[in-house]
Amino acid sequence: MRIIDKLMKEVREEDFLIRVRPFANDDGDWSGEVDISVMAMPENPLTDKDYEQLMHFTKMMCASVAIMEESEDIRKIINEYVLNYIDSEMDIDVELEEEYVEKTYDGNLVHLNFNTKTGGSA
């Protein structure tokens, strides 16, 4: 099963998704810029009021990126929270096909190497 097909099976009609798409420079390295988008299913079963509230909440999460860029104090607070609570107490399991992805750990960094069966020639 293709990874995209597996992901689509995980998405429910009531889900709100935040997509983070990195931009690369001419060398193919991450430029530090991202496009953040909110995605919701057209057939979302929530009431209009609930949908609006959840969409607003999701937009607030996305807005936190711009706020962190503007406020060093908030950026430090969020960074410390992630380091002390998210990274250390939560076991975040990235579900990836093991035959396709090699994971290595360097402190609080996870490096992913996407090796495919076709070696990128598919």
Image (cartoon, rainbow, N blue to C red):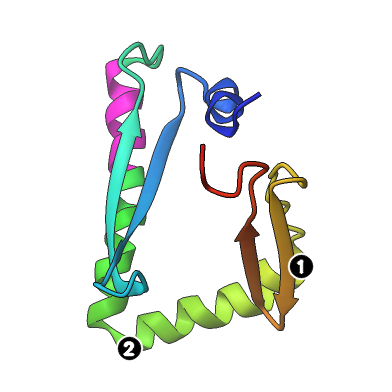
Query: Main SS type for the magenta part?
Result: helix
- Residue 83, relative to residue 8: is it above or below? below
In the picture, measured across the screen, residue 14 lies left or right of residue 21, that is: right
- State the extent of the magenta-drawn residues as a range: 48-57
What amino acid type is highlighted by mark number 1? Glu
Residue 97 horizontal side relative to residue 45, left or right: right
Compare residues 96 and 38 and report the one nearer the observer: 96
Q: In the drawing, what numbered circle is on residue 72?
A: 2
Point 32% across, 64% down: residue: 64
| Kind of residue at disc 2 | Glu
Q: Is the Cβ of the residue at disc 1 closer than 8 Å to that at disc 2?
A: no
Q: Is residue 53 magenta?
A: yes
Quadrant of the frame with the N terminus? top right
- What residue is drawn where x is 32% and y is 25%? 51
In the image, 49 versus 74, the foreground residue is: 74
Q: Position of residue 6 (x, y in %)?
A: 61, 27
Residue 56 drawn in magenta: yes
Question: Which comes before the other along the chain, label 1 or label 2?
Answer: 2
The image quadrant that residue 5 belongs to is top right
- Residue 112 occupies which quadrant of the picture? bottom right
Query: Residue beneath label 1, please?
Result: 89
Residue 28: where, in percent of width, then height?
34, 69
Binning the other alpha carbons within 10 Å of mark 1 as few (below 14), some (14 to 19) or many (20 upward) gives few
C-alpha distance separating marks 1 and 2: 24 Å
Q: Residue at x 39, y 81 (%)?
A: 75
Mark count: 2
In the figure, 69 relative to 53: above or below? below
Disc 1 on helix, strand or loop?
helix
